[in-house]
Amino acid sequence: MSFNDDEPIVASQDVSGEKPAAFLAGKTKATIINKTTAPLEESEFKVMLELTGAGSGNDRSGVDLVTVLDVSDSMGGEKLEKMKIAMLFMIKKLSVIDRLSIVTFNGGSHRLCPLRQITENSQAEIEKLVNALVANGGTNISAGLQTGLKVLNDRRLTSGRTVGIMLMSDGQQNEGGDAAQVPVGNMPVCTFGFGTDHDPTVLNAIANNSVGGTFSDVRNQDNLSIAFSQCLAGLLTVVVQDLKLTVTRVESTIVKVSAGNYIQSKDDAAGSVTVSFGNLYIKEVRKVIVDLLLPAASSPAGSDVLEITYTYSSGGKLFDANPIILTVSRTGRTSVEPEREEVMMEENRLRTAQMMKEARVMADDKKLGNARDKLVEAQNLLEDVVNDESNPLIEMLKSELQQIKRLMKSQEIYEKQGRPYALSSETSHSRQRYAARGDDVEKVRMFSTPRMDAYLEQAKSFDEDPSKPLPSVGDDEKQELAADPLAPIVGALSYYIQTAIQSLKSIDNILNKAGRP
């Protein structure tokens, strides 16, 4: 059966008015952080690159969202009611440029509706479908995932659309094939483990198989609306798609590129590495550390060490940023310039995340004593971090370590609560994207965006009283614009200023070389 019956987007009065012209340039802001000097002798050198989603949501692409929901026997009672409330929150937050399809699964899968444009009428009809859901049967996650993928793959309207799958399950897959083996292509899939009996290994694998997907551990059923809202906040603020960063050696050797588990492709002949990030949300940040080896220099001078460029698409149009050449002063001074604090903080995060992963692997092997020792070691290293002020990142890392250690008190506690928490933490760190971790939906807000923070409060309020009206996504955008009026243009201005500075540097280099004897 083909699912090519997706509804077209019909313009309404609400969206027919003209919007300010959007800039294609500047939707991602590139920041380079590094020491300004390096010694004359051969030396190691670190460069941190930050790519930040810039702009505002008033020119966003419409979202094609498929929710894949577990309605097996174990979802009965209050769990099902909490899922319905979480779904109603999402339905009310989508706008007329968005489309939604709902897929359910138990022993098999069923598409409740095609991709439907969100209008007042369709909203009411979809809410009716959700409210009529009942729980029965087994758990065939694979069937649900495959049906959700087919809904998106069979669409007729694809140009300039943002896509996403949100898959929620509360149990172990006991029918069908292994969902972890289902190829998801370039579809971002966010998975949610609901309660304490789900299969975190499978759900985490599904998210990791996708580009930019995350696994959220929703142990407390009262937090499902919040967890769903965070993923939705991201999808409704996608500022660029198919973001790729390329770094190319100049007078250096690229030793390592640290970018989480995003796909890296190397071109040995060109001496370049390209990292593919997928989508980027407004105000979301991707940090990449490039370890270089600088060759020995014969005399003090400026040295071009790295070329940086990036590409992305927005509204179906491709943007290729002008290359940035990083120049470092090679100096014969005996004093060594200290490493930048921002670089050290990111390295602390990467080291802590790696040690938490190592502890999780030990716990999986039933070596809880070794796992706890590894976490204590990580805690001690964080205590050694010297900082004049309390750093929010360091405090959140300490909180994560403490919570994982607490959930490794016994093998039984670890199996039920520790492993899901650890895996959701891993996927969040490796993707540099927010994911709910156990009960810490408010305490550990690592990688959250302003829209996510706003939706956290909205979801909490809605969960308490679903009859209360919600701000529309248009209201959210107006509030953000009032707080940051220059948001629609500041990214483009920054990009063009950066390009002009780079051009002046290039001219200066040419003149300096021409003036040398």
Image (cartoon, rainbow, N blue to C red):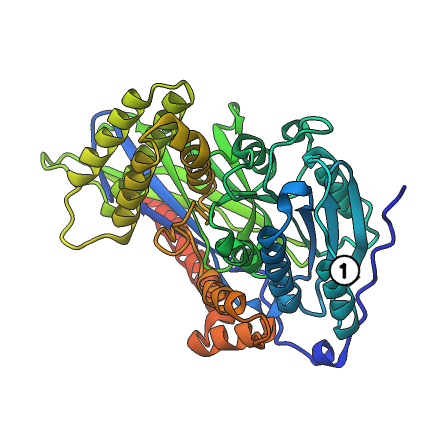
Please give left or right for residue 8 compared with residue 58 in the image: right
Q: Is residue 42 above or below residue 326?
A: above
**What is the quadrant of residue 362 in the picture?**
top left
Name the quarter where the N terminus is drawn.
top right
The residue positioned 53% from the left and 30% from the top of the image is 201
Q: Measuring from the top left, give residue 236's x and y in whole percent.
A: 59, 61
Please give left or right for residue 9 compared with residue 89 in the image: right
Between 7 and 160, which is closer to the camera in this rendering?
7
Q: Secondary structure at mark 1?
A: helix
Q: Measuring from the top left, give residue 423's x and y in whole percent.
A: 46, 35
Q: How many marks?
A: 1
Q: Is residue 321 above or below residue 87?
A: above
| Amino acid type, label 1 | Leu
Q: Measuring from the top left, give residue 486's x and y in whole percent.
A: 46, 74
Residue 319 appears in view: no
The residue positioned 50% from the left and 44% from the top of the image is 216
Name the quarter where the C terminus is drawn.
top left
Residue 430 appears in view: yes
Q: Measuring from the top left, give residue 406's x and y in whole percent.
A: 30, 37
